[in-house]
Amino acid sequence: MYGYPLLYIRKLVRELNNYLSWDLKTVQAVLSVGPTKARKIVEALGAAGLTKPCRGKHFKTWTTTQAAQTLASATAAKSITRQTAERVLAGFLARVDRVNSDDRFLAKVTRVIVFGSYLRAGVDRLSDVDIAVELAPKERRRNDFRELNYRRVAQAESKGHRFSGILDRELWWRSETFRFLKGRSRSISLVDYKREKEFVDKVPRRTLLCSAEAQREPPKKLLKHVRLPRRPKGYPF
């Protein structure tokens, strides 16, 4: 792909899918390359529709797309039987219960949606189980929550985890939960519902969990028609 072996790109994409956002240093660390080559690889990923830049950030960060999720799952795992898929989904839902009941996780799962080939009746061999999840912080007080998050960051760093930057640290509460939910399973393609809502809502899907909090979505802002005042007679402008 764009001069790079597919297995080489797959290795990178599978790792980047674990991050909500990442920068050039992340690519350098995963592939053991210099900054110039890392930048060229990121440009190739963007051209292939596998990544997109994060908006509103003063420093260069990117995130993977649904196409990257599909590439990673389609090439990283062999097809599975429906029986295996049922077992994989049951294990995933058990981890959801664990996240929501364990105070060590700072996030709670408010929505779980299954979509993709799992919903196709009569299909016995599946590529994977496509799942979208929505997370929310358990602690509503912002300052207290941020302090708790940085405690988890310190614990992760003490165990050798490498963070790519400030944003990666700020969002560790989400990334840590996503990693646990996926459980290193190659049979699960896990996406963030808030990030991929437009895509997920367009395909056949089944909601397995939707908390009252998730149902209370903020109303869309309507553009009001503003009537402009009439100019005084004889006004030159």
Image (cartoon, helix red, strand yellow):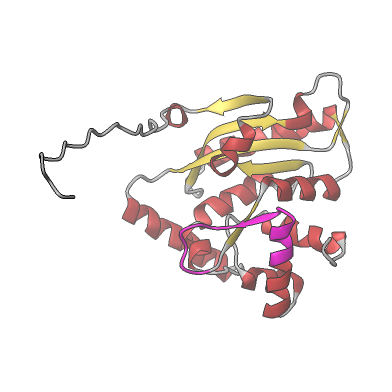
Eyeballing the image, is 49 above or below 212?
below
Q: State the residue at coordinates (53%, 51%).
A: 174
Q: Is residue 112 left or right of residue 44?
A: left
Q: Is residue 174 left or right of residue 88?
A: left
Q: Position of residue 10 (x, y in %)?
A: 80, 57
Q: Is residue 209 visible?
A: yes
Q: State the residue at coordinates (61%, 48%).
A: 178
Q: Is residue 224 left or right of residue 20?
A: left
**65 or 119, which lies in front?**
65
Eyeballing the image, is 192 above or below 111?
below
The quarter of the image holding the N terminus is bottom right
Eyeballing the image, is 231 above or below 215?
below
**69 or 3, which lies in front?**
3
**49 or 141, which lies in front?**
49
Q: Position of residue 162 (x, y in %)?
A: 60, 69
Q: State the residue at coordinates (50%, 53%).
A: 173
Q: What are the residue bounds of the magenta stretch?
A: 43-59
Q: Position of residue 34 (x, y in %)?
A: 71, 80
Q: Is residue 55 magenta?
A: yes
